[in-house]
Image (tube, rainbow, N blue to C red):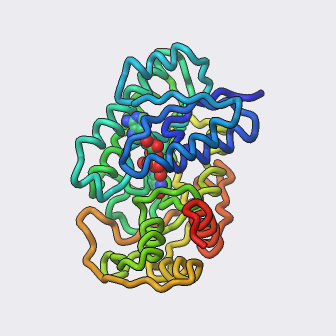
Amino acid sequence: MPKTILVTGSAGFIGFHVSKALLDRGDIVIGVDNFNDYYDTKLKNDRNAILEKHENYKLYRADIKEKNIIEQIFQHEQIDIICHLAAQAGTRYSIEHPGEYVQSNIEGTVNIFEAARKYDVKDIIFASSSSVYGNNPVPWSEKQDVNKPINPYGMTKRSTELLAYTYHHLYGIKMTMLRYFTVYGPWGRPDMAYFKFADKIIKEEPIDLNNYGKMKRDFTYIDDVVAGTLSAIDNPKEYEVYNIGNHKSEELGYFVELIEKNLGKKAQKNLVPAPAGEFLENFADIEKAKKDLQFEPKTSLEEGIKKFIEWYREYYKIS
Ligand SMILES: NC(=O)c1ccc[n+]([C@@H]2O[C@H](COP(=O)([O-])OP(=O)(O)OC[C@H]3O[C@@H](n4cnc5c(N)ncnc54)[C@H](O)[C@@H]3O)[C@@H](O)[C@H]2O)c1
């Protein structure tokens, strides 16, 4: 039986791919997005245009900060499951604009949870982040204490995990939180390093390598993230948190090499100190997601970067 899933942030990178996968398998998707200009809105509109081709997709251009508008959507639609992905993302920007993060990520999430309570939606899957781990030793496991986030973005994501427990306890809403680790791939986010590096290498502009290039990231390819998210949608839990990562921490230098190789162009590198609030390595322990969600990331960084650059060349018409 097809389900009706409300996907917030449906014009965003992960929201678009998750919505598309749900539509392709026959579910009904109600998308919500405010198309804010944190990055190029053309990309959001182009992603949305692809979703609009499906007859089972309906979009509300709405802001989750607007409590009454969110409630009207729930009043009009029969929603089975919520996949809440809308958020103000980005760690660096959060240091300059903490208020926007509190408003979209915490207040916006309260509005979604309140509407779920009022209109009796019992399953919520939502995006948390590896940023909740702060400066914990790697590999990062769900068993670790996560009460010391090192930037406002991580703080808001941890706050929503706590808020979810309260709504689960009071109203019996099932809550699954997915801590995504550095997601990349086609239709990705222009504010993230892999996208910025590709842009700058093409334009022959220098790229900044933070912490003098000594950083590691657990890069997780979008198709693997979609598979993990759909599995969480299909296997609702009472209240659980899962790491969704690739379980492979890669050196920044190697990652730049792969982009260079696929673009056939060398980067000009600036070695700079690590910015405040940035962690030096993230690395996911994914045993729990493997066991409960049969989550098995399949895409190597070599293959993923190749696919990203192929998409990038096609989208931006670069020969
Ligand atoms: N991409 C990653 O590496 C990553 C890692 C960890 C967690 N996450 C989380 O995953 C989710 C999706 O991230 P993404 O990479 O697709 O980011 P994204 O910015 O591409 O997508 C978020 C979408 O939400 C929308 N949005 C933001 N504020 C809104 C509001 N107030 N009302 C309505 N819509 C709003 C934006 O317009 C955007 O389209 C976010 O919650 C993010 O924090 C992402």
Q: Nearer the viewer, residue 122 or 2?
A: 2
Q: Nearer the viewer, residue 119 or 8?
A: 8
Which quarter of the picture shows residue 187? bottom right
Identify whether 58 is placed above or below 18: above
In percent of width and height, residue 123 lies at: 57, 29
Which quarter of the picture shows residue 52? top right
In percent of width and height, residue 266 lies at: 47, 86
Q: Left or right: where does residue 206 sit relative to residue 113?
A: left
Location of the N terminus by quadrant is top right
Q: Can residue 302 be seen by looking at this rendering?
A: yes
Write the residue at 41% across / 79% down: 204
In percent of width and height, residue 207 lies at: 36, 77
Q: Nearer the viewer, residue 225 or 288?
A: 225
In percent of width and height, residue 73 lies at: 50, 20
Write the residue at 56% across / 78% down: 263
Identify whether 4 is placed above or below 244: above
